Amino acid sequence: MSKKRVGILTSGGDCPGLNAILYAVLKYAGSLNWTVYGIANGTDGFIDVALGRIDPEDMRIDEHSFDIPGQKGMGVLLFLSGSVLGCRGKKQREPQEDELICQGYQKIQLDVLIAIGGDGSLEIISELAQKGNWNLVAIPKTIDNDVPGTERVVGFDTAVEVVSDALYNLTFTAASHDRIMLVQVMGRDAGHLALSAGIAGGADVILLPELVPVINERIVSETCLKIAHIRQHKRKFALIVVAEGVQGESQDEPSAEYLKRQLQQYSHLHNSTGATGFYGLGEKIEIRVTILGHLTRSNRPTASDRLLATAFGIKAIEVIAREKDNFQRMVILQEGQIRDRPLAEVMSELKAAKSHSACASPVDPDGFIVQVARALGIYLGN
Ligand code: F6P
């Protein structure tokens, strides 16, 4: 097998497990005697090369490049969150930058690029690869789990763990104070994280953009009804999970804050008009908001994410070894197996999905996980 020059970059929002992919790629590529070039800060790294700001030879990395100094060859990549390569890179790229990116790729004389990204970055890199005629292997990652064509992506499992742990931790303080805890969860336009973590964390209400695009009066009154029911029949505290993609009144106010205001207004209204009891809250209840935000992105990757990340990394090298030339593939998880498929196929699914929804791979409203939530009596907004 010929010796390869492999570039690797991480692009878009970071998530746990990115370095674990790199760990596997460096180990396996090293064992084949291939050379790996770490492209810093997404495709911006190519621009730096094209403009002569960095010498390609300084970008060479191997499995010992990230050893802890003085720690006898102890590597950290498998366990370390974030990305040692950096994820920066512009969300909107200028047309003249494409040319520089392609020049950078050529200057390093890469045989292939491994691009680790979510739906947005993979779309951009896939276009660049076509333009520059690059060989490309894409590896899907994001805490949002919204990349089409794969059953799971790197980073999602850890994020579910973090959010469900947060819900568990909030339960005790909620119970001590008889409070409603309202927790806003990341996920951009997708509700996968809110749904999975909400179920695993014991939420009573989970609002997802796929089922509740906007918080309206019905949602508010039914949420109050659900809480009133819990307080009458079960316990005094409750946990509400709201995905950040659910819209409130304005973009400037987090949806959880908006929902809190609406719940307070609703219960106040129903108090003062006397129409309390089952339909209103009928009593003063304290609501506290927690916005988990970027805390969700930096935990140590779970074993399951480390396993997926390393399997995807090894598969990427296998694909490169197997393919001759002119290939653009994505590694995927399908029916429990690590496979690969043409990236163009995934991109056309992505474009088709995005033509009628903001999210490329939304929660299936009729899917089993939604059924699970319903069967548990969790209020989902319909
Ligand atoms: O796509 C991952 C994600 O964490 C989303 O869940 C979130 O909406 C977004 O990135 C946050 O982006 P930024 O890190 O640019 O604030």
Image (cartoon, rainbow, N blue to C red):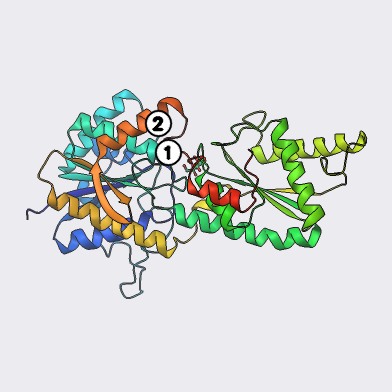
Q: Is residue 140 visible?
A: yes
What residue is at 27 percent from the left and 35 percent from the top? 345
Sooner in the amino-acid sequence: mark 1 or mark 2: 2
Instruction: Kindly state the secondary structure of the residue where label 2 is placed.
Output: helix
> As rendered, which of 301 and 101 lies closer to the eye?
301
Horizontal and vertical percent position of residue 257: 70, 39
User: Does the Cβ of the disc 1 residue fall within 8 Å of ligand 1?
Assistant: no
Mark 1, other Cα within 10 Å: few <14 / some 14–19 / many ≥20: many
Q: Are dots 1 and 2 in contact, CB under 8 Å?
A: yes
Label 1 is placed on what type of residue? Ser
Label 2 is placed on what type of residue? Ala
Instruction: Kindly state the secondary structure of the residue where label 1 is placed.
Output: loop
What residue is at 15 percent from the left and 44 percent from the top? 111
Left/right placement of residue 61 relative to residue 78 reads: left
Disc assigned to residue 361: 1
Horizontal and vertical percent position of residue 85: 35, 50
Horizontal and vertical percent position of residue 161: 52, 59
Residue 108 lies, with reference to residue 81, above or below; the image says above
Quadrant in the rendering for residue 176 = bottom right
Residue 346 lies, with reference to residue 161, above or below; the image says above
Residue that mark 2 sits on: 353
Horizontal and vertical percent position of residue 149: 33, 42
Quadrant in the rendering for residue 266 = top right
3D distance between C-alphas at marks 1 and 2:
7 Å
User: Does the Cβ of the disc 2 residue fall within 8 Å of ligand 1?
Assistant: no
Q: Can residue 295 be seen in this view?
A: no
